[in-house]
Image (tube, rainbow, N blue to C red):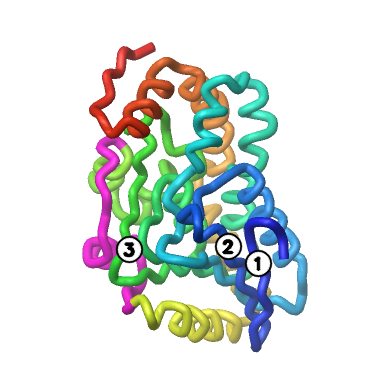
Amino acid sequence: MTNNIKIERLEGGIARVLVARADSGNASTPEMLGEIRDAFLALSGDATVRAIILAAEGKHFSVGADFAFLEKLTTTPASEIKGTVYANFQGAAKAIYRCPKPTVALVQGAAITVGCELALACDFRIANDKVRFQESWIKLGIMPPLGGLFLLPRLIGMGRAMEMCLLGRPVGAEEALRIGLVGEVVASEELAARGEAFAAELAAIAPMAYATVKQSLQRGLESSMEAEWQANLPNQALLLGSDDFREGLASVTARRAPQFTGR
């Protein structure tokens, strides 16, 4: 066990990476994302692992980035954001997306910003009936930097992706199922069991064939994903250094409408 996550071994070659910060709504910190990255990299190279579940304890999958961490970003140099912070945040998304094993996210409650993007990086998503996906980065004056801008248009279409990313519009369970953001919606009490049953189906698939087909599908999609990640690094660093980010963060903390200036 690490400080922020648990790695559990289930029967049939299934591993579960469980975020264990329920007291904070599983809010994301660089340390937590680094642990998720390292867990997926280790499990990717473990021949005994046949499928991986990404899940979280408590009411929410993730309420987004930790606010104390966001406050710190207002005074963090862009070079440090690029070189250190996103080594963990993008590192986690990359490790999940590039994992050759089958991956499934079990998503409950809020899956906001970072939480939404990590779920998108998985091969499959199963949600409970109280789920709320939201790419609300723009409400803070910043952008989704972990792959959502690339994946969402391909999963749900450009129009809906623009609503999620440019308006920060939340998507609930029924809509998420209808538009293909998730593959299944189940009752909260059934989520863990359904996830394990689905992971068992995935674990039964020929590993080499799965990895090859997955890699081929991703390659066929990409313009490339690597180009998207690279482009997002300097762009997000600039946004995080802006007055608008500081105003967006202050307005959310104070629960008032933001007054963005474009600086």
Relative to the observer, which residue lies in front, 172 or 178? 172
Residue range corresponding to the magenta coloring: 166-187
Q: Position of residue 17 (x, y in %)?
A: 61, 67
Query: Disc 2 or disc 3, which is closer to the eye?
Result: 2
Q: Position of residue 175 (x, y in %)?
A: 22, 62
The residue depicted at 57 percent of the width and 50 percent of the height is 93
Distance of mark 2 from mark 3, alpha carbons?
Answer: 18 Å
- Disc 1 + disc 2, Cβ < 8 Å: yes
The residue singled out by tag 2 in the image is 20
Q: Is residue 220 magenta?
A: no
- Disc 2 + disc 3, Cβ < 8 Å: no
Callout 2: SS: loop
- Asked if 175 appears above or below 136 in the picture, the reply is below
Q: Which mark is residue 6?
A: 1
Q: Amino acid at mark 1?
A: Lys
Distance of mark 1 from mark 3, alpha carbons?
Answer: 22 Å
